Image (spheres, rainbow, N blue to C red):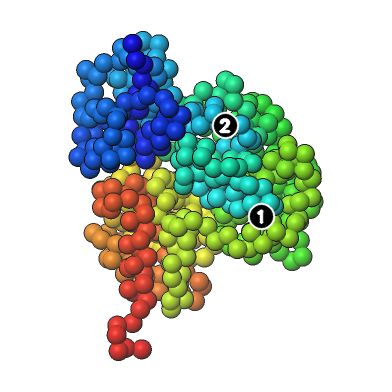
Amino acid sequence: MNRYHLILGMGNSGQSVARYFTRTGQPFVAADTRDDAALRAVWAEAFAACSVTMGDLTALPLSEIESVIVSPGIPLALPLVQRAKQLGIPVRGDVDLALHALDVPYVLITGANGKSTVTALVGELLRALGVKTAVGGNFGTPALDLLAQKAEIWVLEVSSFQLESTDFTDLSPTAATVLNISQDHLDRHGDLTTYAAIKETVLHRACVSVINRDDPMVWAMAQRAFGKTITFGATPPEGVQNFGLLEHAGGLWLARGNTPIFPAAELGIFGEHNQMNALAALALVAGVLETQGNLPAQLTDGRIAQVLRAFSGLPHRAQRVGMGDGVTFIDDSKATNVGAAVAAIAGQTTPLVLIAGGQGKGQDFTPLAQALSAHGVGLVLMGQDQAQLAEAVKAQLPKLPVRYVNSMHQAVHAAAELAAPYASAGALVLLAPACASLDMFESYIDRGLQFAAAVQALLTPPEGQL
């Protein structure tokens, strides 16, 4: 009897699994809960020999299935997945497949916020030092597609959805980090403790664990870390192996122990939260260099400084998209949860107008009010859950001006009006929605692009007018 791998989920991740099985000559079939004609056409063209089932999967037979490869977007609670487990059929994810097929060192980066920025920056830093580095995972190139590249080390962003389908029993990352923990995906994971425990799996057998000492839930993980621990945080570092901010030469510097590495004010990425992202990236690079037998002194290499100065971040992640009449406009559309929005707000030190709202996914919006209490001068709300967000903020900040809008164009104009009185103090308009985007936009990317377009339209005088 022929045996097949079942690819469950036919989106980008599922397609990367199909390409891997095709390269390795392993038979597979595919299924998806969505009965999507466009998706079916993609598979018919790319994987013509593959049998496809779409829509209701209740009666899908499993008698010939060797393993189920579940895409991150498919919850493990799906009845088909539970039936496979009951039958003793292995249920795996794309990251699990990739890591078990890998024969080079690898770095794993997870957390609620900042993981894409840190992943990209670690990749840039290692490449600058001459290390042939493959970067991807949940961010950029799917993990299984990276197997086709020749690399000396992998740097992967991994999500909680990918981690819950990865078995770390015999995996040992060279370095790994949980950057932070905040409310996200609780509609799938149930509670914050479960979510944190899933994130922590990256540390279970890591040679070097990079720990955020400013996050209580992450700090608690340090006590259970498997190998060497390196910490980072906003305070001066205690111990020569740890990273933090140090007063030096009249300003704050990123530092390891008592050794200044780079002036914080010269970072190419914007905001105090990105100083933490840069410290986490440096700590991971240090862990790699030391584990591979190189000297930590390389962190003071001029090539490191060049990357820290030139790296301007990723699109829709604390990205400056315009400045006019003393107001700076920042696109952090990737801040799709409360924790990410709070980090973006806390990273600023001047008067701030926040544009927020969308699909809240059952989150508690109270921390937004606490974050806005320091520098917030206005709030512009849009989307499905704007009323819940307004209620949470107004309960603590009843005098904060709030505007309600129905489009990004309206949001930018309303925010600019609220920010104008504070222009002389360097006011900011920050798009950090704290919510998913699909109620009004195709994606967080579309939301960010519409924000940037609206800002440019606001800042560009009509034709013929100076």
Q: Closer to the camera, 148 or 411?
A: 148
- Which residue is at 23% across, 40% downward? 41
Where's residue 219, x and y in %?
A: 62, 35
232 horizontally vs 430: left or right: right
The Cα atoms of the two marked residues, 1 and 2, are separated by 23 Å
Which SS class for mark 1? helix
368 horizontally vs 384: left or right: right
- Which residue is at 46% across, 76% downward? 326
Q: Closer to the camera, 261 or 346?
A: 261
Q: Can residue 298 be seen in this view?
A: yes
Where's residue 122, x and y in %?
A: 61, 48
- Which residue is at 36% across, 10% downward? 87
> Which quadrant holds the C terminus?
bottom left
Residue bearing mark 1:
128
Q: Closer to the camera, 275 or 100?
A: 100
Which dot marks residue 78?
A: none
Residue 190: which quarter of the image? Answer: top left
> Which quadrant holds the N terminus?
top left
Q: Which of marks 1 and 2 is nearer the N terminus?
A: 2
Residue 34, compared with residue 58, is above or below; it is below
Residue 232: which quarter of the image? Answer: top right
Which dot marks residue 102?
A: 2
Residue 84: which quarter of the image? Answer: top left
User: So how many labels did they put on this image?
Assistant: 2
181 horizontally vs 72: left or right: right
Q: Is residue 370 visible?
A: no
Q: Which amino acid does label 1 sit on?
A: Ala
- Which residue is at 21% across, 38% downward? 36
